[in-house]
Image (spheres, rainbow, N blue to C red):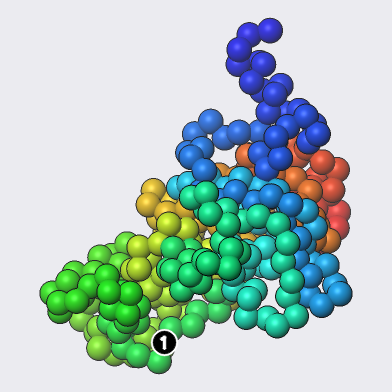
């Protein structure tokens, strides 16, 4: 058996023979520096357990897609990564979510600092009721990332350029962010997220409310942004996951059933449940 065959066999080994959190198959083109390590993560809404023993290693500067039927725990898991679930009084969390060797659920963790490092883009665009300029400049100013007006101007322009929006709004920066089209508003929200220089961007169905042209623009943007940021996205669009993601995790009834290189997930899924979902037999 040559070395390449041995590696493929090792990557395709059953779950109990692999280290917890590792994908079934590794994407040879992906960056495998660790960004977020999750071990034995459980979450309850009151008495209802929504996440069950989730284990996953998420790699830096890749796009990881979370797929699965509605209500299976994808968005709940996403919100565990920046403690957005803390805003729900009935939530109880057990397990490890680790960045840079620190558990994000540690009582000493600064939640504001965490959410600066782990930004979020929501399903429906939600610009602040401020100008386009202030939508970008406000948070960096609050975090003391910029002070002088010239620094703010430079940061605003760079964030809008990175979000592919600068040429469309450069002559109307003082107009309300809400005056933009839906697709432009979503890119404004992405620019707002990246302006504070996060390590990770969470995207919860970022294109579900957009038209096909705006969706394609956001997908192209995700491919460019992963050169700078780790991106984790929830999507119900199988074709979108196949197009944009390096890795895909399939959730079902609060469990992560399969975590795999996206190409393998869609061409040769490791589990029957993932195969049935991807081929449309249920979901």
Left or right of 159 in this view: 152: left
Using the rendered view, name the quadrant where residue 239 is placed. Answer: bottom right
Image quadrant occupied by the N terminus: top right
Q: What is the x, y in percent for residue 187?
A: 41, 71
268 or 11: nearer the viewer: 11
Image quadrant occupied by the C terminus: bottom right
> How many callouts does the rendering have?
1
8 or 106: nearer the viewer: 106
Position of residue 265 relative to residue 234, above or below, is above
Q: Which residue is located at x 20 percent, y 81 percent?
A: 171
Q: Is residue 138 visible?
A: yes
Left or right of 45 in this view: 156: left
Q: What is the x, y in percent for residue 75?
A: 67, 67
Using the rendered view, name the quadrant where residue 46 is placed. Answer: bottom right
Q: Is residue 279 visible?
A: no
211 or 172: nearer the viewer: 172
Q: Which residue is located at x 73 percent, y 32 percent?
A: 18
Position of residue 181 relative to residue 84, above or below, is below
Q: What is the x, y in percent for residue 84?
A: 59, 73
**Looking at this rendering, what residue extends furthest in the front direction?**
108
- Check disc 1 and report the residue beneath it: 128
Q: Which residue is located at x 30 percent, y 84 percent?
A: 134
Badge 1 local density, few (<14 within 10 Å), some, or many (20+)?
Answer: some
Q: Which residue is located at x 38 percent, y 65 percent?
A: 194
244 or 44: nearer the viewer: 44
Left or right of 271 in this view: 117: left
Position of residue 255 relative to residue 141, above or below, is above
Using the rendered view, name the quadrant where residue 146 is placed. Answer: bottom left
């Amino acid at each position: 058996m040559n070395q390449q065959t041995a590696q493929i066999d090792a990557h395709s080994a059953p779950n109990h023979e692999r280290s917890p959190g590792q994908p079934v198959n590794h994407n040879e083109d992906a960056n495998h520096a660790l960004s977020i390590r999750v071990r034995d993560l459980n979450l309850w809404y009151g008495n209802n357990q929504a996440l069950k023993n989730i284990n996953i290693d998420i790699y830096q500067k890749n796009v990881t897609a979370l797929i699965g039927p509605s209500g299976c725990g994808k968005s709940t898991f996403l919100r565990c990564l920046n403690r957005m679930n803390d805003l729900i009084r009935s939530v109880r969390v057990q397990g490890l979510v680790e960045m840079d060797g620190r558990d994000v659920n540690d009582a000493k963790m600064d939640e504001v600092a965490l959410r600066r490092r782990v930004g979020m883009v929501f399903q429906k665009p939600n610009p602040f009721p401020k100008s386009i300029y202030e939508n970008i400049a406000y948070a960096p100013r609050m975090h003391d990332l910029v002070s002088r007006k010239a620094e703010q101007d430079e940061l605003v322009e760079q964030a809008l350029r990175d979000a592919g929006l600068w040429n469309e709004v450069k002559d109307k920066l003082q107009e309300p962010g809400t005056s933009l089209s839906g697709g432009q508003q979503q890119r404004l929200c992405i620019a707002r997220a990246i302006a504070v220089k996060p390590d990770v961007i969470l995207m919860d169905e970022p294109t579900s409310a957009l038209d096909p042209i705006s969706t394609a623009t956001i997908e192209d943007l995700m491919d460019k942004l992963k050169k700078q940021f780790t991106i984790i996205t929830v999507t119900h669009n199988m074709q979108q996951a196949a197009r944009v993601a390096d890795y895909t995790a399939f959730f079902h009834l609060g469990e992560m059933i399969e975590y795999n290189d996206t190409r393998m997930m869609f061409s040769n899924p490791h589990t029957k449940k993932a195969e049935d979902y991807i081929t449309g037999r249920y979901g």
